[in-house]
Amino acid sequence: MKTLVILSHPNLAASRINKALSQVAKAAADVEVRHLEGLYGLDIARIDASSEQDALASAERIVFLYPMYWLNVPPMLKAYIDIVFSHELVGSGALKGKVLQLALSVSTPLSEYSKQGAIGFSLDEILTPLKIAANCCGMDFAVPFISSGFEPGEFGDDAVDAAAARFGKLLRGELSPNEYQI
């Protein structure tokens, strides 16, 4: 399956988990990685909607790879969605039938994403706007890939390696349902 990974991280150089996952994606067969901040810096006016739409058109699966950023996507990914997923693109049906896969990292343990946890909402509830966007585009929303418990400075290389191995399995279509962590 031809996969397009849209990577957004405001400081990828300082990231351990998202950097590791992006390296796995870059090494995978039939995967193209587009790092938004690497392409456009932090200037949303530089986003080339036409080039990004061409990249989307050639993919069967679109993966948004990002760290949870105040219970949302990072600013460049939000701008990308607003600019690239235009009314014309969505109305043309160009995204219909494509798979939208989220691959996100969270610093908080998954147990905090519940009615009883510190966050008070599940990740499933928090991701509802992206599910709705996929639905409006006619896309299939895949089970999100979650890497949790990555509080800066509080996790080891083993945790990064395990998440990277799981992500490789996801990209190859080999990830079992219990490995998604949602």
Image (cartoon, rainbow, N blue to C red):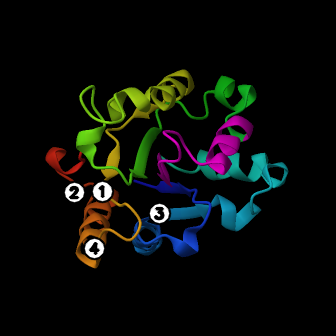
Distance between mark 4 and mark 3 Cα atoms:
20 Å
In the image: residue 175, left or right of residue 83: left
Could you tell me residue 60's position as x and y percent? 47, 46
* Residue 154: quarter of image: bottom left
Q: Which residue is mark 3?
A: 31
Could you tell me residue 14's position as x and y percent? 53, 73
In the image: residue 109, left or right of residue 32: left
Mark 4: amino acid: Asp
Q: Which residue is mark 2?
A: 174
Q: Please rate how many residues cluster around mark 2, counting C-alpha atoms within 10 Å: few if below 14, some from 14 to 19, many from 20.
A: few
Is 37 inside the magenta-drawn segment? Answer: no
* Residue 25: quarter of image: bottom left
Which mark is in front, 2 or 1? 1
Mark 3: amino acid: Val
Could you tell me residue 15's position as x and y percent? 49, 70
Give the extent of the magenta segment: 61-83
Mark 1: amino acid: Gly
